[in-house]
Image (cartoon, coloured by chain):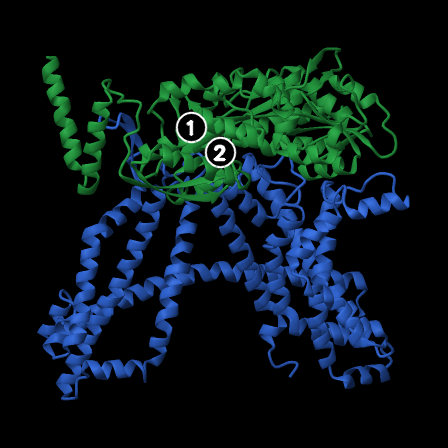
Chain colours: A green, B blue
Amino acid sequence: MKKILAVIMSLSMLLAATACSNDSNSSKSESKSDSQNSGGTSNTGSDEYQLKESASLKVWASQEDQEIVKEMVESFKKKYPDTTWNIEFGVVSEADAKSEVLKDTEAAADVFAFASDQLGELQSAGALYKITKNKDRIIADNIDASINASKVGDDLYAYPSSSDTYFMYYDKKYLSDEDVKSLETILSKNLGGDVVNFSFDMDNGWYNAGFFFAAGAKLFGDDGTDPTKCDFNNEKGLLAAKYLISLANNSKFKLTDDDITKADFADRKLGATISGSWNAEDIKKSLGDDFGVTKLPTVTFEDGTTTNLGSMANFKLIGINSQTKSPMEAMALADYLTSYECQKIRFEKRSFAPTNKELAGDKDALSSNPVVAAAAEQAQYATLQSTIPQMGNFWTPAEAFGAAIVNKEITVDNVQERLDKLVESILSTLT
Amino acid sequence: MTSIDFFFLPWYKKVFIKLGNFFKALGKGLFGFILAIPKGIWMLIKNIGLFFLGLGKTFARGDFATKISFVIMGFGSIVRKQFIKGLLFLSVEIGYFYYMVKTGWNDMLGLKSLGTKQQGWAFDEELGIEILQDGDNSMKFLLFGILSVMVTIAFVTFWRISISSAYETQLIKKKGGKVNNFIDDVKDFFDQKLYKTLLFLPITGVLLFTILPLIYMISIAFTNYDSVHQPPGNLFSWVGIKNFKVMFSSNSVLGSTFFPILIWTIIWAVVATFGNYILGMLLAMLINKKDIKFKAFWRTIFVLSIAVPQFVSLLLMRNLLNNDGAINMLLLDLGLITEKIRFLSDPLLAKFTIVLVNFWVGIPYSMLITTGILMNIPADLYESARIDGASPYVMFKKITLPYMLFVTAPYLITQFIGNLNNFNIIYLLSGGGPSNLDYYQAGHTDLLVTWLYKLTVNSKDYNYASTIGIIVFVLSAVFSLITYRNSKSYNNEEEFQ
């Protein structure tokens, strides 16, 4: 019986091979014999990538990453010298990847970097290639949270490359290491003149959700995958919203964004702020020896509970375009771009926190970089940003909610009603 | 009522009568517009009927060769020794049938379902990975379906031309006249029919690059091409006028966003258009006054803001008016205010700010235009008015304004439509913000057109964006037609010449 099965299988393979066009035929059979030599036995094939003789790929990465990605691709070419590579580069940031890819999937890059919150929408639009090659190894190599952010159901759709969250930067001239442990202490200080004690981007869902998470409210259910659940309007959410309202009314607080933050630190007019690794270099330059970075502070809510501020954790992923002409080659490249070596380069040159278990477990190396160390410390309070498509509905209402608090349209009197509206908008479907 | 009676009425009654007249005209215009629709449809049916009638007559009167031309295009021409012309017709037919067999017929069938096969995955034994199985791409089905319909219409046109050409040559032969050979025909296209030669390229361009995409975009409004039906992974299909129903129903999220935005859009367009117009006119009149010196200097000063590209000045304004922008900082430093003025982040204030900035951008243009017209008003009109003892206000009301409105009514209409769709100023100045929790994907200052943009770019709801696009088009078309038809510039062309 087994023999018959084997015969049928080899026949079908033969059929598949002859069905292909002539030029790819030769290369495929070659690579097949290669894999047989290297001892591929299971039906998932060997770990080796069976590459064509030549392949053209387009790679998208953000402007800041262009240089290191080019460097990585050069070493990738050296790793697979048997294939003639023709690799093009394009500048598309992780944040814009979704809209660029969905504009015209066929014209988009074969391999592109994107932020994990876009995974759901990209996958449901059929723009991502399912990753089955070396799936188990990728899952084993990277930390669980990053794998969860790359999965839809049980299928893997992206390669994790780095983790991303926000933490606190502070100016040691104004605040001591002790002060920054609690937000209340930060706000109670009198820093004099027009120096603002604390700032953060309140009209941005990515940041203001941290207060809700700290209070214990949940977005899209316990595991962040239920599009019909959001309890930001329960008593816990109410605590968080009231905290935000009192913060907005505090004259020592200021609404900010990346540009304002950088300018404020440059003018030395800011005590502490919430931001991420992307601003590390600029802030370090402005503050010099007074540069301080740590996890987010604790907050004490109205009912007396004190918890550490939560944050939304995000992962930078590398995905493969479903319309690619060379999936195998694209997978080899994406796999390499997220390997130990490349994550190390990212960590060293760009202060990106790695997702590779081996690298992330290397405490000595990590603590040498205070920014990554702060991110790692904050990670225990972080909530993984949901990857379901409904997440696309979260940002605008959350932004509006934050803006309304800053504008003092939301007060303690109408906050419950506005919270209900926020949840309704987040969970709304169009028809 | 005679004009004398009207003159002696109290002012408030005059206002009522004027308002009444306006609405009467509006109602009449709307009524006429709606009446014109069945008339247009009737004309279309009539033309189609005439087309077939003409065909039938030709068939009945045509000889053998002409009749064969109904099936084999160009046959009539070839028989009458117009070989090249006949072969060209024949090749059009062959080309069309080749296209139809190859893809066209399937494309046209696909237009009905917009694809049925969903993208999937299949395990590839050899490579050891799952390989993508391409599904149908609804977007392409729609596009190529429309293309095949357009090609078919073009073919029918050619077919008709070939038949009438065959019939014409038949008649010429019968009379014993000379049948044009190919060179004569080509010469004709550079002589008598030069307009056809010249128009060929632009018309093909417009058809391919304007009409085809337009039909495609309009069609999307009748599908469910939204964020959950995105190709290539998903299929979308026809839903009829459901999107319009959703948009107009007040209990859907979209409806409750649509109406407030529509109202703000109209308020904005009215205020921006007439504000710019009136203020620009006042400024021009001020400069134009007899006792003002250095007229050219003042004009140059005010026109200078045109020299800066609009988007640059808008982005600059955005920075200046920021919560931490230069204006707030300056006012704080001077001690004039104690709290920052939230120019662009307070919902109501943001609207005023935008209107004001728009004045700054737009007034120079209307000043320039009105200056030119002011200088054209015959001075003797003013002189005789002054002798009759008219006050400056009366002169403005009776001479300047009517003259101005007469000349600039079309300009006002285009300005109004332009402001309805004023994407630049909103997008660059406030970005539609501050965001509004009660709206779907929109902020307090979003116009319909910027909301449309956000729907396509942020939330990928292409069908609703297209629906809004159609509604905006209908609105602006109806408005401009009615006002233009009722304006003096259209009705009384001779009056001021």
Crowding at mark 1 (Cα within 10 Å: few <14, some 14-19, many 20+): many
Return the chain for callout 1: A
Above or below, A100 relative to B207: above
Return the chain for callout 2: A
Q: Secondary structure at mark 1?
A: strand
Q: Nearer the viewer, residue A347 or A418?
A: A347
Q: Which residue is mark 1?
A: A158
Q: Nearer the viewer, residue B431 or B125?
A: B125
- For residue A287, which quarter of the picture? top right
Q: Nearer the viewer, residue B122 or B438?
A: B122
Inspect the image, locate mark 2, and give the three-letter code of the amino acid beneath it.
Phe
Q: Nearer the viewer, residue B314 or B403?
A: B314
Q: Are marks 1 and 2 in contact (CB under 8 Å)?
A: yes
- For residue A210, which quarter of the picture? top right
Above or below, A315 relative to B456: above
Q: Residue at x 17, y 88 (%)?
A: B178
Could you tell me how far apart the alpha carbons at marks 1 and 2 are, in whole angstroms?
A: 9 Å
Q: Left of B431 or right of it: where is A387?
A: left
Name the quadrant of the N terminus of chain A: top left
Q: Earlier in the sequence, mark 1 or mark 2?
A: 2
Q: Which residue is mark 2?
A: A114
Percent of width and height locating residue B196: 34, 76
Q: Secondary structure at mark 2?
A: strand
Total labels: the figure holds: 2
- For residue A423, which quarter of the picture? top right
